[in-house]
Every structure is written in structure tokens, then in C-alpha cells.
Amino acid sequence: MSRSLRYCYNEVAPFSALVIVQFTEVGVNILFKEATNKGLSYYVFIFYSFAISTLILLIPLPFIYLRFSAQLCGYKGIEYSSPSLASAVSNLLPAFIFILAVFFRMEKVNLRSSSTQSKIMGSVTSIAGALVVIFYKGPTILNAASPSQPPSLDSLLVSSQRNWILGGSLLAVAYILMSIWYILLTHVIKLYPSEFIVTFLCNFCATIIAVPVCFLAEANLGAWKLKPDIALVAVIYSAFFSTIISTIIQTWSLHMKGPVYVSIFKPLSIAIAAAMSVIFLGESLYLGSVVGAVILCIGFYAVIWGKSKEELIEDDENLTLSNLRFQSNSMDPLLQR
């Protein structure tokens, strides 16, 4: 393989694929929110999404259950709040993954190193930004609602604020579980490097779990009838693009670049979700979301700066070691004379 092709495969392809993943995931969140506004049960959505994705992948083998719990908390959090909040809280992922990677010795920690200090401070800053987004809604800075819509009552505002905090808390739990999932999946894909099979195994087992959980949680049989409207579109879109395509891309990227690299693309979803929520859902943009997102991005890029500096140091060390080995091998014939 030529140097240019190797560069495209190792650098350009993962970057482009992960950017596409952010668009598809925000698209799922937008469709899910609109579908639930039209009456789609959240449990019905979860079950059908995993079941359809498993049928598409065809090959029946068992795997792991963690992703199902993350999806359960994540979509419930969106139901209580909004796709914009989900995208903002998702920026906790790099911080959570860094902490777990240190615990599992996948990341080096040297407290005297500026790269380690940057990653630690960035993780703390990211968590602080997420807390701002969850617990401080703030005044509306962009109102996309219809001018003829009557003002909300104080009781509804209090209820909305409670739902916002509950939704944000559920989303935080979802991304903690997702961080653990990324760490475990990184180990799995190194031992068994088949992205398609691993994705199927995940979805198949999640479907098995979804059957009793979702049917018990949603006892209304009428809710399980999908009509040819936004609900059906949301389920099929989620099953194909999010549950299959995004998972395969992320699994492949975890194999190629590692969990920290995959997680750094989450801030991109903030801008996508904010724009799409205003355009397609008519949601308002709040000051708390903007302030929290800025703090999150600062923390995020601090982690990435530390990671990049660490990789440069490792590359220099590997290059030096390679040169020393080359010089040693070159001198061996001379010494033998």
C-alpha cells in the first residue's frame, strides 16, 4: 500500500466517517423527538430499532448488553429534554473515557507532564460545563416558537425545568455507560477485529433484552402498531443509520484510532443539534446551553491538546529508537570483521 493510500485509510477515512456519524446521530435524535411528540412510545421505539437492525444484520450470535442500557437512558433523557441538551451532555464522553482509560491503563499519567495536566484539567472542565447545561437553563436567546403561541403558566415552567434536569441526569448516566462501552469494545475489537459481526452481536443481545423490558414497560398494545408516519421513519432511520452504520463506523474507528479519538468528535454535534432542533422542531435556544457548551468545548480541546502532545512525544521516541536500532544493525558487520 502506497504512503498516500495508507494516509487516507488511517487518517482521512476515520475523520470523514466520524463526522458523518455525528450528523446521523443528531438526525436520529431529531426524528425520535418529533415522533414522540406525535405519540410514539419510547419503549416501542427502542424495541423496534434494535429488532429491525438485528434483522438487517442477519447472522444470529450472542454478545454484550451494556449499549442497550445506555440507549434506554439516552432516549428517555431526550424525551424529557431536547436533542440540543443530548448533544451538549454527550461532550462528557471524552472526560469519562479519559478517566476510564487511566483506570484500565490505556492512558499514561505523569502528573509533572503538561500533557497529563491538560487532560486532567480538560476532563474536570468538561464535567463542569455539562453540569451548567443540565442545571442552568437560563433565558431564551433564540425563540423559534410561533408568535401566536400563548405564554406558558408558571406551573408549566417549573415542570419543564424539572424535566430538563431529569432529562440531563438521564443523559449523563447514558454517556457514563457509553464510555464504559467504548472501553470494553476497544478491547473486544482488538481480540476479534470484525466490525460487522461485533455490531450484530451487540444488537442481537440488545433485542433479546428489549423484548421483556419494553413489553413490560409499555403495556398498551395499541402503542405497538406503527403507522406510516414520522414514527415509522424514526424507527427505520435509527435502526439503519444509527444502530448499524454508526456503530460499525465507531467500532472500526475504535480499532483504528482508539476510544479517545472517537470521543473527540462529540462537540461537533452541538452545532448540528442546535441548528436542526430550531429548524425542524421549532425549539428555543437557551443561554445555559450555550454557556455550558462553550465550557465543554474548552475542556474538550484541552484534553485533545494533551493527547496530541503525548502522541507527538511517543512518535519522537519511537523514531529515535528506530534510528538507534538501524545504526546498531549497520555496525554489526563492521564489528564482526
Image (spheres, rainbow, N blue to C red):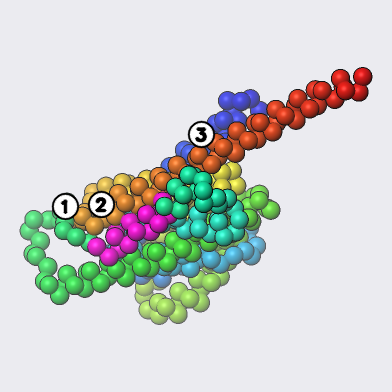
Q: Mark 1 points at which residue?
A: 141
Q: Mark 2 points at which residue?
A: 290
Instruction: Judge from the rendering whether residue 255 lies leftward or rightward of residue 246; answer left or right.
Output: right
Secondary structure at badge 1 equals: strand
**Tag 1: residue type?**
Ile
Q: Which residues make up the magenta segment?
A: 122-136
Q: Nearer the viewer, residue 278 or 47?
A: 278
Residue 250 seen from this side: no
Instruction: Judge from the rendering whether residue 325 lies leftward or rightward of residue 82; answer left or right.
Output: right
* Residue 62: % across, % down: 64, 65
Query: From the image, which quarter does the C terminus lie in?
Result: top right
Tell whether position 96 is magenta.
no
Which comes sooner in the sequence, label 3 or label 2?
Answer: 3
> Which mark is drawn over residue 12?
3
Q: Are marks 2 and 1 in contact (CB under 8 Å)?
A: yes
**Tag 2: residue type?**
Val
